[in-house]
Image (cartoon, rainbow, N blue to C red):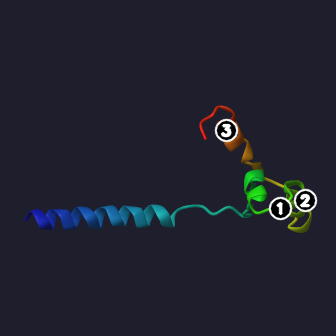
Amino acid sequence: MKKKYKAILILVIVSIMIFLLQHRSMPEVIQYGVSFSEFRSNGLDLNPKETFDSIVDDLGVRKDIVQDWYWRMMLEKKGLL
């Protein structure tokens, strides 16, 4: 009897998930972003400024460029790394 209720519960949960996923609205235009890391650029022996400029110029990225290198630098300054 317990297995029967468990199976019914799983079936109900899966049905609800399928229903909710089918009714998600998709945006008309999808915009992608990039993340740039000066730390990773240096780690690959690349010039960070040239790499960043290439991302902007060659790839045509104009929005959502996030520089995440500052976080590691802050941790190093505080002696946490």
Position of 13 compared to 49: left or right? left
Label 1 sits on a secondary structure element that is loop
Q: Whole-Å distance between the Cαs marked 3 and 2?
A: 24 Å
Task: State the image coordinates of residue 4 (x, y, percent, origin top left).
Answer: 14, 67
Foreground mark, 1 or 2, reads: 1
Q: To which residue does mark 2 refer?
A: 50
C-beta proximity under 8 Å, tags 1 and 2: yes
The kind of residue on which mark 1 rests is: Leu
Position of 78 compared to 47: left or right? left
Label 3 sits on a secondary structure element that is helix
Residue in the image at 52% along x and 63% along y: 23
Q: Whole-Å distance between the Cαs marked 1 and 2?
A: 8 Å
Quarter-of-image position of residue 63: bottom right
Q: Out of 43 and 22, give the one closest to the viewer.
A: 43
C-beta proximity under 8 Å, tags 3 and 2: no
Label 2 sits on a secondary structure element that is helix
Residue in the image at 73% along x and 61% along y: 32
Q: To which residue does mark 1 refer?
A: 46
- Dot label at residue 76: 3
Q: Whole-Å distance between the Cαs marked 1 and 3?
A: 21 Å
The kind of residue on which mark 2 rests is: Glu
Foreground mark, 3 or 2, reads: 3
Task: State the image coordinates of residue 31 (x, y, percent, origin top left).
Answer: 74, 61
The kind of residue on which mark 3 rests is: Glu
The answer to whether any part of residue 34 appears in the image is no
Decide: few, some or many residues near mark 2? Use Cα within 10 Å; few <14, some 14-19, many ≥20: few
Position of 51 compared to 17: left or right? right
Task: State the image coordinates of residue 22 (x, y, percent, origin top left).
Answer: 50, 67
Sequence-earlier tag: 3 or 2: 2
Sequence-earlier tag: 1 or 3: 1
- Dot label at residue 37: none
